[in-house]
Each structure stands twice: as structure tokens, then as C-alpha cells.
Amino acid sequence: MKEQPNPTINLEATITHITPSFEIKDDRFDVNQIADSHLMIEVGHDRFRFAIFSSVHNVVMWLEDYHVFSLLNHNQLLSTVKRIYQGHHFLAANYWKTIRLTVNSNHFTLIPDEYYQADEVVKYLNFAAGKNLTEYEQIFEFKQSHFGIINIFSVEKELINWLKEMYPAKKITPVPVISTLIEGIVKDRTNHGLHLYFEENYVSLVYFQDEKLHFCNRFQYRTAPDMVYHVMFIMNELGLETDMPVIFYGEVTSFSEGYILLSKTLKNIEFAKNPTKVKLSQYFEEIPEHRYYTLFSSYYLY
């Protein structure tokens, strides 16, 4: 019997509707409240998530979290986001009170105000990335006013342009996740010691000394032992003791390999709590607070 060839599968064609991997919905929210609600979006290479803060109830009432299956083509993220919007019954509404966009940029660098030159931003970012930016990336800036530094970062150009077209009546200004994390920490007055923000295959280290930002960098890793090496190397370089408080954020749990390995050396690990000045609906009582800290902290930026 002759073997039949396997048909070519078009992945994008087979995924017509995308459902959240995690969601919380307060049934008091309805579309009539959109004009009195803030839409907070966080997007990265492997995640798209959004939350809704209602000015009517003065709480976060809605959360949806989607996983993006990143392929090698540069527009896979945008293709997935488009499908999420196409299948959603109110996300594309253009009459939100505000829209706050946090982006997870692979390339960023922090420049002190006194050294910053506007006409050198491409050079700054190319140097930080270790290569020239592609034609698909667009450069933005965010000023960390508390510390007199500017975060220069890149975002997928087509994604930003599409979101601006989606919400033409609103100002869409991207802010990098790492800056949102720093701003949240400052607002919550926890700007001391070491903070670790975890993503899939990335870890960011933020260290405050005397309440001032002393170190900030992001490292890519392939395995959990690689991640532990980066963390311990930086701690050693900074002269930090292993019994100091270390706060964890993002995609990490007490059951993950990275946590288990780090906990063998770090003696005082804490998981971040929700931002202190952002109230959440009672439906969020069981939420893993550290996971969505940056998303909720974007409320602080406006």
C-alpha cells in the first residue's frame, strides 16, 4: 500500500479562535461601563494580557491572559493579537477612558539624563543589543523621573502601528515592562534590596541601594541552572549577601525548577504582593499576585 504524504498544515489558518489561558471576570462589569474604565494592556513575545480598572467601582474588575506561541517569523505576535481581537466582544471598543500599554521589549538600555543625547538613541540601543536593530523595530523612550534616567527601548513597529489604528481616538504610548516594574516598586515604597522579574527564558534583576536604582539588567537563559548562574554572578558582583530579602515577580512559582534551585542559596525569598494603591475586585482573592504586578502597576503611570 502506497504511503500518502502528510498534508501541509497552516498553523494560522487552524487557529480561528483563541481562548485565555487564565481569566477572572467580575459579573458586575458590562460594556456600558467602558467609557468609565481604564484598559491596561501588557504584550510581549510570548504573552498578551489585559485588565480593566473600573472608575465606577474603583477596582480592577476583569483580567484575561493569553499565551502567544512564538514562531520565528517576526509578525507572529501581531497575528496572534489580531485573532484575539477578532474573537473578542468588547476589546476593540474605542471609547475607553484611557488605554495603557506596557510592552516587553527584548532590547532596552538606561541612560542617565546628563549623558543622554537625542540624536544618539540608535547607537545606544544597537550597543545594548550587541547588533543593529532590524527594520521591524521602532525606538521609544520613557523617562524614569524618580532617578533621572531615560529608558530607550524598541518595539515591533507593526504591532504599535496596528494598536494605534485600532484606537485612533486614544493616545497609545508604550512603556517597557521593566520601567513599569520600577515605577510600581517606587510607588509601593519597596525600592530597596533586590527584585527579580521572571519571564519564559528571561530574568531581570533590579537592585536598589539607599532607595536609589543601582543596577538593572535582563538576561536570557536556556535552562534553570543558567538562570541561577546569572543571578548569583550579579549578586556576587554587587557584593550582596544570600540572606538578604529578594522579591520575585512574573512567571515563577514555588514549584518551578528555577525557584527550587534559587531557594537552596537565597534564604529570604518573598513573592510580590499586588500594588498597594490599586484595588482589586473580590473576585481576585485567589490570584497569584506576583504574576500580574507589572500589568496592574501600569495604572500608576497615568
Image (spheres, rainbow, N blue to C red):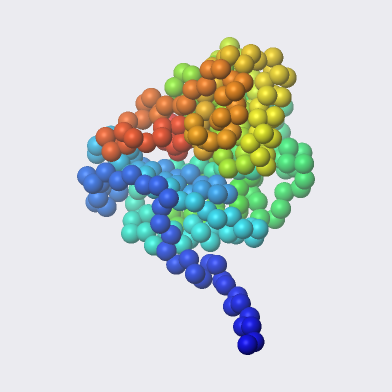
Question: Above or below — where is 102 with respect to 161?
Answer: above
Identify which residue, 110 or 263, lies in the foreground.
263
Expressed as whole percent of the image width and height from the top left, the position of residue 74 reads 64, 58
Residue 113 seen in the current view: no
Question: Above or below — where is 134 with respect to 153?
Answer: below
Identify which residue, 115 or 199, lies in the foreground.
199
Expressed as whole percent of the image width and height from the top left, the position of residue 189 reads 46, 18
In the image, taking residue 28 as reference, residue 216 lies left or right, namely right
Tally the numbered discs. Answer: 0
Asked which quadrant contains residue 62, the reply is top left
Residue at 73% in and 41% down: 129
Residue at 43% in and 47% down: 65
Which residue is farthest front? Answer: 1
In the image, taking residue 205 as reference, residue 27 lies left or right, namely left
Identify which residue, 129 or 200, lies in the foreground.
200
Which quarter of the rendered picture does the C terminus lie within? top left
Expressed as whole percent of the image width and height from the top left, the position of residue 26 reads 26, 44
Expressed as whole percent of the image width and height from the top left, the position of residue 201 reads 62, 42
Which residue is farthest bottom? Answer: 1
Asked which quadrant contains residue 188, the reply is top left
Which residue is farthest left? Answer: 28
Which quarter of the rendered picture does the N terminus lie within? bottom right
Residue at 55% in and 30% down: 259
Question: Above or below — where is 242 with respect to 49?
Answer: above
Asked which quadrant contains residue 208, the reply is top right
Residue at 62% in and 39% down: 202
Residue 197 seen in the current view: yes
